[in-house]
Every structure is written in structure tokens, then in C-alpha cells.
Image: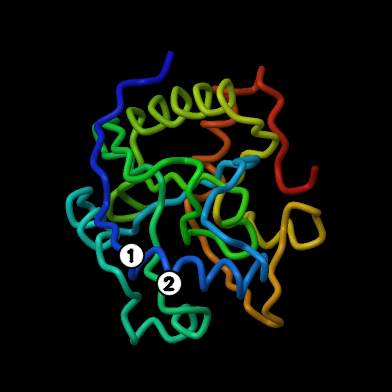
Amino acid sequence: APPDLVDRPMAWSAEREQLMLDYRRLHSDPDAADLTITPKAIVLHYTAGGSAKNTMRYFDRTRIEGDRKALAKGGAANVSAHFVVDRDGTIYQLQPVTRMARHCIGLNHVAIGVENVGDEDRWPLTDAQVEANVALIRWLAATHPISHLLGHHEAMDMRDHPLFVERVAGYRNSKPDPGAAFMARVRAGVEDLALRGPAD
């Protein structure tokens, strides 16, 4: 059974769909005709902020802001995720898990993105978020061919893995989220699923 989900569709338009399709063609599949993906990985993130509402409002923007120069060079489509997990464990679903989102370089074409409200300092991630992520991962792994569970900070360790596809030379980044401690707690909760990490 799915965990309790709050349906909160992010703003979507023909313009945004075209920008995302342009992004997919540039970065992973030049022949792509749509944004449909088969999820094989789940990537956990944190927002580095304290508000789910503000995070979702940010994802509603069609285009990425110009001052995020490194990301803007990779395309005009704004970043997004499939889920946002609030600090009390509430899980918001923003878009279908079979639609490509821009949340993790090299893995967007196969990965479900889960954003957790908080960080490792000012708004430490909570026990409720660990439990919510565990429940969400269990459901996703039961309904899709998920082989890998990753933290955003582990994504670049997948560079030599067949799942990692990035066609733009030098388009890479290094992220700290959601941190090793959070990933260890979540992985302990789904250990029986035997999901692979970045080295597998």
C-alpha cells in the first residue's frame, strides 16, 4: 500500500514541457519524443531551507533563474522533484514518478527525486522524515523496477555506471545533500530490500 500522500501538482505548462524535453535531448537522449521514464533509482535530497511551501513554490517556476549560472548553462528548465517530505513527515507528490524531473545530473532519465525539507545544520532532518522516506521507498520499490537508492551527494560516484548518462562534457556538480548520516538511517530502514548504492 502507498504511504499517505498529499497530491500537490506543481505548475505545468506546454512551455515547461518543451523546456524539459529540450533538456532531455541535450543531456541524455537526443531522440527523445516525450518525458516518460522508467524509474530505476531513487535519489534523496534536502532543500537547505525550512519551508515545504517555499520549496514547492520555487519548483512551480517554469525557468531556472539566471543567477544559478552553472545550472542555467545546462538548460532553461527549472529544477524540480517528484516528492517533497516536510519536517513532520508529510509527503507531497508534485508530479508522476514516470515523468522526468530535473534534480540530479546524469540520473534524471532514470531517477525519482525526493526532497526533504531541511539540512544538516540549521534545520536538521527529522525522525519523521526518516520514517516517511522509508515508507515511500518501500512503496516505490514495490511498484517500479528500482535497483538503486542514492543520496544526491553520491550521484557523481555513479559516473562509470551504466545508469549514469550525461552527454554534455564537463557538466558535473558536487552536492552535500542529504548527508551520510541521513542516508545511513534510511538505508537501515529498507535494508531488506537490498537496494544498491553508488558502488554497486
The residue sitting at 58% across, 69% down in the picture is 174
In which image quadrant can residue 107 be found? Answer: bottom right
Q: Nearer the viewer, residue 156 or 35?
A: 35
Q: Amino acid at mark 2?
A: Leu
Seen from the viewer's position, the closer of residues 81 and 100 is 100
Q: Secondary structure at mark 1?
A: helix
The disc placed on residue 67 is none
Tell me which residue sits at (48%, 79%) in the image: 75
Q: Nearer the viewer, mark 1 or mark 2?
A: 1
Using the image, determine if residue 3 lies above or below residue 6.
above
Q: Return the residue at label 1.
A: 14
Q: Residue furthest top?
A: 1
Q: Residues within 10 Å of mark 2 (few under 14, many from 20)?
A: some
Q: Which residue is mark 2?
A: 19
Instruction: Using the image, determine if residue 65 lies above or below residue 84.
Output: below
How many numbered discs?
2
Q: Residue furthest front?
A: 33
Which quarter of the figure is the N terminus placed in? top left
Give the percent coordinates (x, y) of residue 188: 59, 25
In percent of the image, x 80 and y 54: which residue is there?
Answer: 161
Quote the CA–CA distance across marks 1 and 2: 9 Å
Q: Position of residue 81 (x, y in %)?
A: 41, 52
Amino acid under label 1?
Answer: Ala
192 up-or-down from 61: above or below: above
* Foreground pick, 2 / 130: 2
Residue 184 position (above or below residue 73): above
Mark 1 is surrounded, within 10 Å at the Cα level, by few (under 14), some (14 to 19) or many (20 or more) other residues, namely few
Q: Looking at the image, is mark 1 or mark 2 earlier in the sequence?
A: 1
Element under disc 2: helix
Residue 55 % position (x, y): 25, 56
Across and down, in percent, residue 10 comes to 27, 51
- Quadrant of the snapshot with the C terminus: top right
